[in-house]
Amino acid sequence: MPNVLIRDVPGDDLEQLRSAAADRGLSLQAYLREAVHMQAAHLRRRQALDRAARRLHGQTAVPDDERLAVLDAVDDAHVERAEELSDPPT
């Protein structure tokens, strides 16, 4: 696996990251690896959404009630996942 080096991280930021890692029972390296992985996953989802938007451009819009139901379900899933990620491992 490739390595990444980040230079000139402000001390206050580094302390905040170390504290967050410790709160989750992770090393700083594991915490940052997870953060990088989550950011990459977010970028992949964003690209997929952009491709879908280009494909759907000019199509008939989804009715508001159906669109809102889907968005509510996505929000609920995000809340559940955030709760899973914020719970320290047992």
Image (cartoon, rainbow, N blue to C red):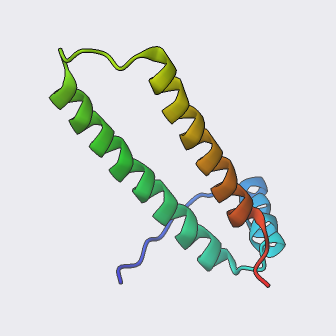
For the C terminus, which image quadrant?
A: bottom right
Q: Residue at x 47, y 65 (%)?
A: 37
Horizontal and vertical percent position of residue 9:
63, 58
Compared across the picture, whether 28 is left or right of 90 comes to left
Horizontal and vertical percent position of residue 79:
68, 48
Q: Which residue is drawn at 57% across and 41% down?
A: 73
Compared across the picture, whether 43 is left or right of 52 comes to right
Q: Residue at x 19, y 18 (%)?
A: 59
Question: Which residue is at the front of the view, 14 or 31?
Answer: 31
Q: Is residue 64 above or below residue 50?
A: above
Q: Residue at x 78, y 59 (%)?
A: 16
Q: Is residue 64 above or below residue 49?
A: above
User: Would residue 48 be seen by someone viewing this image from the given angle?
Assistant: yes
> Which picture quadrant has residue 54?
top left
Question: Which residue is at the front of the view, 20 or 44?
Answer: 44
Horizontal and vertical percent position of residue 22:
80, 74
Q: In this view, does 26 lie above or below 62?
A: below
Question: Which residue is at the front of the view, 90 or 74?
Answer: 74
Horizontal and vertical percent position of residue 1:
35, 84
Compared across the picture, whether 14 is left or right of 43 comes to right
Compared across the picture, whether 40 is left or right of 34 comes to left
> Which picture quadrant has residue 74?
top right
Question: Which residue is at the front of the view, 65 or 36?
Answer: 65
